[in-house]
Image: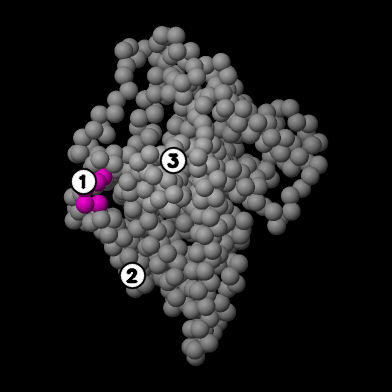
Amino acid sequence: MKPAITCLASVLTLLLLSALFNPAIAHTTEQGFVLLLPTKVYIWSGVLAVLITTLALCVLPNKLSHQIFSDANLFLIKQQPVAKTIVSLLSFCILLLWLTSGLFGPHDPLKNILPLSIWTLFWMGFVVLNALLGNVWNWLNPWSGMYQLVVPKAIRENPPLRISERLYYVPAIVLLFGCTAFVLADIAPEDPLRLFWVVSVYWLTTFIALILFGDTVWLKYGEFLSVMLRAYSKLGPLQRVRHSTTHSQLRIGLPAWHLKKPLNRSMGFACFIVTLLACGSFDGLNETFWWLAKIGVNPLAFPGRSAVVGQTVAGILIASVALLVVVALCIKLGLRLVAMHYRKSGDPSTLEKQPISFRNAFAAMSVSLLPIALAYHFAHYLTSFMVNAQYALQAYSDPLNDGADILKLGQHFVSTGFLNTRDSVKIIWLTQGLAVVTGHLLSVLLAHNIALQLHKNRTQAILSQTPFAILMVGYTFLGLWLLAAPRGA
């Protein structure tokens, strides 16, 4: 393991050096400070860190590349189906409390538990926490418990409908697109009453889908939150691997080690990952001066969401399709380079294995984009979470907005002081920037590891991932630029 530790230390050192050579840091929400900081230096430092890592992997021995994502056993965990059902039922009860607040609570989104819990505690906070701790959502989702409690065993064992394998993940992709459109294009996604109806209808339709298709199938392939959170959870250092029908093995390794095996990957899952990254990227692009100028809106006189609904929805669709096409072209070009090398080479070891199909390569390599998607999710929402989490704390202490102080906070005021000084904003933006660069470095390492397993021959593996690696380097620039870009909405 010493070579792996040495390599990891080198990567971390590279990250730190990229930060030390650039004292200028910026922040997405404090645009006054952003405009005063030479963020270009930091952006190019991050890009250079990813580029150097990519080039270094070309000379890194295969054995060492595989050791980076090695894992170790910790201990066995007994399956607890009854406890899982109880936890899910408790989660459902908490959701009912949130919905009650949305229906009868304060109309102010910053004082109502429902929008603060859905958008701040869950969407901004829990998504990242679930990735770090493993798939906690598998226990906490508010459907499984009710499904086990009220649906007859005969229906659970033999659902009335089945989803064709060709359509796996298609519902999840459609629902992901719909959620992104609601968040970015709807005129009032944080309105408590509006959110009450959206969440209620979504819970009910999902529960009906569980009855029709079975909970295992729908939560694994159809319900987008479960698909997204399960995907992100595979990035965590701690993973539960099924050991038997009654026990799971807890294992530990470098983040994303659980994604190192490229076999039996689904095209649908790969398309979901690319769409997830595209939606997150457009979320950052949506309010920039550049995008507003493209759709003919004066960034200094934003007319409101209702005036750009069509453009926003079209932008999400274009971003998703464009990234799918770009990723597919990069992988296709990589396979073309492998095929050219295969035809020209006379080395018997090279001829042992024919180039893999585009379908298998796309399904395997696209999953390596997951660390980028999660890193940008964290960076994009960091400051919003730091502020709105304080509002959530106040709301839980005074859920009816009648002066109660359930949590005994006393006279508590929401603070945004950390956004009002240059030094604190530097620290925040540095955290965001390092998260983005780290996500890209992890993706580069994972993509290289997967390519080595797919192609066996080292030269072919490097050729196959060259266009894909160039895309990752370019995406590093895009992610850091989005953090620093001035916003007008």
Q: Name which quarter of the figure residue 425 lies in.
A: top left
Q: Residue at x 59, y 54 (%)?
A: 269
**Pair 1/3: label in front:** 1
Tell me the tag on residue 55: 2
Which residues are drawn in magenta? 34-39
Q: Residue at x 55, y 50 (%)?
A: 314
Question: How far apart, in angstroms, are the residues tagged by discs 1 and 3?
Answer: 30 Å
Label 1 Cα crowd, 10 Å radius (few <14 / some 14-19 / many 20+):
few
Mark 3 or mark 1, which is nearer the start of the sequence? 1
As displayed, is residue 376 above or below residue 201?
below
Q: Residues within 10 Å of mark 3 (few under 14, many from 20)?
A: some
Q: Helix, strand, or loop for circle 3?
A: helix
- The amino acid on which the numbered mark 1 sits, given as a three-letter code, is Leu
- The disc label shown at residue 36, or none: 1
Which element is circle 1 on? helix
x, y percent for residue 175: 61, 44
Q: Nearer the viewer, residue 430 or 306?
A: 306
Q: Is residue 479 visible?
A: yes
Residue 220 pos. (x, y %): 63, 46
Q: Which kind of residue does numbered mark 3 sit on?
A: Val
The answer to whether 388 is drawn above or below residue 407 in the figure is below
Task: Kindly identify the amino acid type of the residue bearing the numbered disc 2.
Answer: Leu
Inspect the magenta stretch and tell me whether residue 38 lies in it.
Answer: yes
Q: Horizontal placement of 21 versus 267: left or right?
A: left
- Name the main secondary structure of what is drawn in magenta: helix
Query: Is residue 455 rendered to the left or right of residue 58?
Result: right
Position of 222 with respect to 115 (left or right) is right
Q: Where is residue 167, by image quadrant?
A: bottom right
Residue that carries the numbered disc 3 in the rendered image: 128
**Which corner quadrant holds the N terminus?**
bottom left
Q: Is 230 in front, or is 300?
A: 300
